[in-house]
Image (cartoon, rainbow, N blue to C red):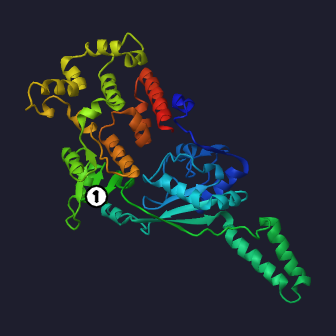
Amino acid sequence: MEKLRAAGLFGGGMVMLSGSLAKRYNECLAMLGVTPTKLKTFSVDGMGWSPELAVEKKDNYYLNTGEANVNAIIISPQQNGQAVHMPSHSFDRDVMNAVFAAYGREIRDITKDSALVLNLDQNIDAFFEPFDLLRYNEIEVTFSLLNELDKKQMEQQAFINLFKRKNNFIDRDVHLQILNSAKEYGDLRGRKLSLDPIKLKVGSFYTRAFGGVFVMKEFLKKILVFEDKKVFKSAINDTAHDILLFHKDHDELIDALIKNLLLKKDFKSALRTPRYDRIKKHVFIENTKKLEHPINEILDSHFLFKKYLNKLPIEVQKRISGVELYYQRLIVDKNLKIEEYVDEDFVKILHEPHSSLKQEESALVWKLISKIIPKDPVHLYWYDKEQFYNLYADWQTGYQDWVIAEILENNKKQGL
């Protein structure tokens, strides 16, 4: 992971906490019923999640109260626009962006001497079955201030109002109440410390609940796609809901997504994309062990790549180059079926999000494709970082270096 960290691809977009900020963070954890950290210095992302604390607590989702209740901590205005490294939902970063857009000025003021704990509430206390996810139509973000500073403001204002009443300006006890409040919390007059809840509509989304579920609910038919086979097998026993249920590995899933205008099939166009080239090289590396040249030289050289490709068993060559072979033969025989030449994984991964989809819907479909066939390292990093990091650890060192270079180059092209 050190190479990823050095390249800014792991742990990037983090805010370092120490001293008083670390102390406040621990006090926020206490509000959530989470034991404090023993670390003196650590980093947090846009939602207040810390990779160091996740390791310490052996829990990537230590901020949450069960799968249905997602929490966040804002300890510094520097969290604005930062990455969300361990989201529970595909929309978590959008929620944080909306919070900072609505209350950026107030957050800068509050975090001077306090902090915020956020609850992303969908009015569901707990998920009991996957179909509860269909009720997830609106998020209400509520705010709790560290040390209840908003309530202390009301108390301080009450003391001031009492001071102004009749002859209370000469009452030493009233003076003392105001002074004690000001010494402990500062002058709270004129500060906006009470933040109204923010309500946000929720469309289709991905959640890690129930082992990972894609909830597609704004199309011709509502669709749930499961990562966990056990959860899927339990869900299909339900007959009360008129929705389509699939496990991510089902062959029928691709056809259902095409019929519901989530996917499009244009393999000829896909052949001409850098993505297809990356997929071929990934499969090549999976099937190659002994190499006389550095991996990056092989993958970046058309001639070296062809040389090593031709050393592989013929069935492996056909698997890697099956799409080109199919279209070459199709010129002679129009009755050929693509399944006769192209590996099943290639058929699935060459589909793309339908052109009619909104940007967030398209990103959700790319995430699903990456879950089904994790063969494109760049898209895997963009849309499923957790799986990317897990797979990256087992890749050959030279391939790791090549993938890092590819991600950095494509990030630059996308302005990321």
Looking at the picture, which amino acid does disc 1 mark?
A: Phe
Q: Nearer the viewer, residue 250 or 59?
A: 250
| Residue 389 image-quadrant placement | top left
Farthest top residue? 292
Rendered location of residue 375, percent (x, y): 33, 33
Q: Along the horizontal axis of the image, is 393 left or right of 196?
A: left
Q: Residue at x 20, y 26 (%)?
A: 322
The answer to whether residue 380 of the structure is visible from this angle is yes
Rendered location of residue 193, percent (x, y): 67, 67
Q: Which residue is mark 1?
A: 219
Q: Nearer the viewer, residue 205 or 115?
A: 205
Whether residue 388 is situated above or below residue 63 in the rendered picture:
above
| Residue 387 image-quadrant placement | top left
Q: Residues within 10 Å of mark 1 (few under 14, many from 20)?
A: few
Assign a secondary structure to mark 1. loop
Q: Nearer the viewer, residue 11 or 368?
A: 368
Whether residue 393 is situated above or below residue 137 in the rendered picture:
above
Rendered location of residue 223, percent (x, y): 27, 56
Q: Along the horizontal axis of the image, is 335 left or right of 103?
A: left
